[in-house]
Amino acid sequence: ALVGIADQMSGEMAVAFVVIRRPITGEALQSFLNARLDASQIPGLVVAAPAIPRNADGKIMREPLRQAYLESLAAAKPTFRVNSG
C-alpha cells in the first residue's frame, strides 16, 4: 500500500507499506523494485507492516498506516530506505 506522509524536506513523501512474509535485505528489495518500476515510481521509504488494514468494502485504510509509520519511527521497527535515483 502506498501512502503519502508529511515530510519536512519535500512536503510529502511516498511511503510503501509491505507485508514481508520472509526475510529480505534492503538490497534485494531495491532490486525487486528496480525490476518492476520506473525510477520515478519507487517510493522513498518502505515500511514492513504485519498486515494492510482494509475497510468492509476492501479499500485500504491509509490513516492506520500513517499511524503505524509514526509508531515505527518511535520503536525503530525495520524500514528500508530505497534510492529512487
Image: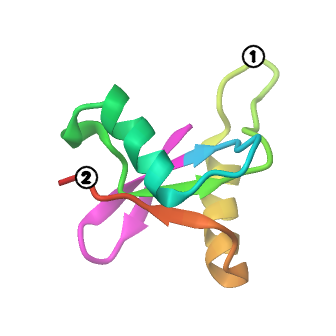
In front: label 1 or label 2? 2
Closer-to-camera residue (69/41) = 41
Q: Crowdedness of circle 2 by 10 Å Cα count: few (<14), some, many (20+)? A: some
Camera-side residue: 66 or 84? 84
Q: Which disc number belongs to residue 57? A: 1
Queried whether the magenta region covers residue 14, the answer comes back as yes
Residue beneath disc 2? 84
User: In percent of the image, x 32 and y 43: which residue is there?
Assistant: 42
CA–CA distance between discs 1 and 2? Answer: 33 Å
User: Hey, which quadrant is residue 83 in on the image?
Assistant: bottom left
Magenta stretch contains residue 60: no
Q: Earlier in the sequence, mark 1 or mark 2?
A: 1
Answer above or below: position of 31 versus 78. Answer: above
Where is residue 11 drawn, in percent x and y? 28, 66
Q: Amino acid at mark 1?
A: Asp
**Which labelled disc corresponds to residue 34?**
none
Quarter of the figure that contains the C terminus: bottom left
> Which quadrant holds residue 62?
top right
Side (left or right) of 43 relative to 18: left
